[in-house]
Image: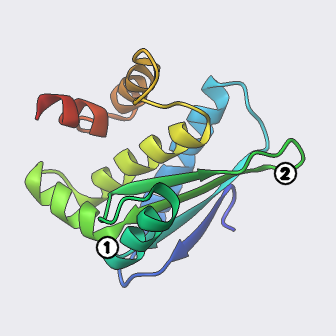
């Protein structure tokens, strides 16, 4: 574990130290904003077949997706849970939306962390969208998943 993010890269994508430090800053900002301390998460970078299998097993959706979150509901563990991100979606979306793979990775990470913390854009009244927008503006990132999906 680097610091607060236990990273498991199951792909050939090379994550730079700068990107990893940036993801840690994003994580720290989210925790600070929500008044949380001493929390950690697991981040897995996988290919589409792997995330499709997880999506099928855990959500009964037999298709690949960009990001999955698996919260750990425990008062005793500092681990919030696991975020699984598809490298194939990072590459596809960074090309489609004309930004860098690092930006796409950060967007998916933000989206996943907010799900670990209980935000749910499918059920809430815009709270996740608002929090994503705040973080995106703060870190000068391109539009979020929720915003992109609303524009489609």
Question: Of label 2 and label 1, which has the lower sequence position?
Answer: 1
- Left or right, 33 with reference to 47: right
Would residue 107 be seen by someone viewing this image from the given angle?
yes
Would residue 15 be seen by someone viewing this image from the given angle?
no
Q: Nearer the viewer, residue 25 or 47?
A: 47
Q: Going 36% across and 85% down the picture, which residue do you hit?
A: 12
Q: Nearer the viewer, residue 22 or 121?
A: 121
Q: Going 35% across and 25% down the picture, which residue do you hit?
A: 133
Q: Going 19% across and 36% down the picture, which residue do you hit?
A: 148
Check the image and name the residue furthest to the top: 125
Question: Which of the 4 image quadrants contains residue 94?
Answer: bottom left
Q: Nearer the viewer, residue 19 or 80?
A: 80
Q: Residues within 10 Å of mark 1 (few under 14, many from 20)?
A: some
- Left or right, 103 with reference to 85: left
CA–CA distance in space, label 2 to label 1: 30 Å
The secondary structure type at the circle numbered 2 is: loop
Q: Position of residue 49 (x, y in %)?
A: 34, 78
Whether the residues at callouts 2 and 1 have beta carbons within 8 Å, the answer is: no
Q: Which mark is residue 48?
A: 1
Which of the two discs, 2 and 1, sits closer to the camera? 1
Question: Which of the 4 image quadrants contains residue 4?
Answer: bottom right
Q: Which residue position is annotated with label 2?
A: 77
Q: Which mark is residue 32?
A: none
Question: Which of the 4 image quadrants contains residue 91?
Answer: bottom left
- Left or right, 92 with reference to 18: left
């Amino acid at each position: 574990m680097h610091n607060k993010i236990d990273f498991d890269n199951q792909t050939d994508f090379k994550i730079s130290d700068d990107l990893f430090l940036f993801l840690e800053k994003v994580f720290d900002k989210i925790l600070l904003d929500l008044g949380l301390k001493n929390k950690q998460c697991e981040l897995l970078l996988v290919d589409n077949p792997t995330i499709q299998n997880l999506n099928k097993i855990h959500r009964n959706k037999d298709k690949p997706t960009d990001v999955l979150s698996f919260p750990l509901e425990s008062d005793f563990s500092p681990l919030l849970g696991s975020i699984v991100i598809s490298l194939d979606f990072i590459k596809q979306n960074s090309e489609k939306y004309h930004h860098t793979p690092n930006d796409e990775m950060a967007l998916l990470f933000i989206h996943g962390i907010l799900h670990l913390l209980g935000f749910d854009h499918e059920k809430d009244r815009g709270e996740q969208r608002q929090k994503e927008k705040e973080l995106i503006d703060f870190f000068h990132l391109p539009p979020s998943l929720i915003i992109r999906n609303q524009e489609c």
